[in-house]
Image: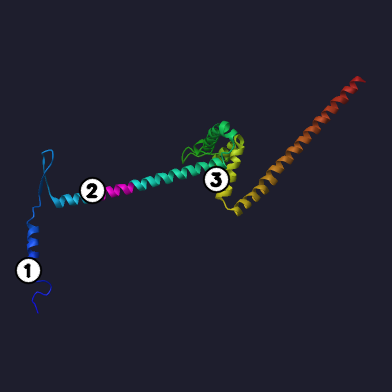
Amino acid sequence: MSKFFYSSPNELDTEHQNENHNNQEPRLQSELLSTGNQVVQSPPLTERLHEWRNLLIHQYNVVVAEWSNLKSATKNEIDSGREYINRNVLNDPQENNRLLVPSSILSLGAFFCGRVLTNKNNWGYRSIVNRNPSILGRLLTSLPSRTVLPLALAGVVFNQLTPGTAKNACHTFERDFLSESFVQEYHRIWDQLYVQGIKQGSGQIGETFQNSLQNGIKSIRESISAINDDKKQ
C-alpha cells in the first residue's frame, strides 16, 4: 500500500508550488491609467472596500425603500382620515363655507374662558398660607370642573353656531368609537335626567310662570277697566 494515501508525491509538490507562488504574489499592484497617472493599490484591500461599498449601497437602498413605503402609508392614512371626516362630519356646505371657521375660533375662546373660570389663582388661592376662596370658587376650581367646564363651554358654543356639524360629529363618534350598549345606556340616562327631568321641569315652571303672568296682567287690566267705568258713571 502506498504511503501517500490521499495524493501522490507529484500532486503534493504541485500544491506546495502553488502555495509558494501565491505567497510570493505582490500585495501591492501598480496600474497606469489612460491619463498617464500611475495608481498603486492593494488588491485585497480594494476587494474589501468594494464589498463595504456594495453593502453600504444595499443598506442605503433598503432604508430609502422603507422610507418611501412609510411616506406612502402615512399619506394614505391622512387621505383616508380626511375623506372620512369630510364624508361623515363636514358634509354641510353652508356651515363649511361660512360658519365653520368662526365657530371654531369662538369655541376655542370659550374653552380658554372656561380655563380662566376654573383657574385657582382667580378665586383666592394666592398662596398656601393665605387662602380664602368662596363657595363658588371651591366649586369651580374642583378637579371635575377644571376638566369638564372648558370642554362643555366649547361644545355648547360650537353646537349653537354649527348644529349640523356638531350633530354629525357626535353621531359619528358614538357609532364608530363607542359600543352600542354604552350608547343606549347613555341616551337612556340622558333622557331620564335631562329631557324628562330638567328640561321638562323647567318647561313646566316656565309655562306656570307665563300663565301666572298673563293672569296677573289680565286682572290688572280688568281692575283698570272697572276703575275707568266707575269714573265715567
Left or right relative to 89: residue 6: left
Where does residue 36 sit, x and y in percent of width and height?
10, 39
Q: Is mark 1 in CB contact (under 8 Å) with mark 2?
A: no
Which of the labelled discs sits on residue 209, or is there none? Answer: none
> Is residue 68 in sight in this rendering?
yes
Q: Tag 2's secondary structure?
A: helix
Horizontal side, residue 152 vs residue 216: left or right: left
Q: Amino acid at mark 1?
A: Asn
First in residue order: circle 2 vs circle 3? 2
Query: Does the magenta portion include 59?
Result: yes
Query: Would you name the residue on which mark 1 appears?
Result: 10
Q: Is residue 141 visible?
A: no
Is 167 in the magenta? no
Where residue 196 appears, x then y in whole percent?
A: 70, 46
- Say if mark 3 contacts mark 1, CB within 8 Å: no
Majority secondary structure of the magenta segment?
A: helix
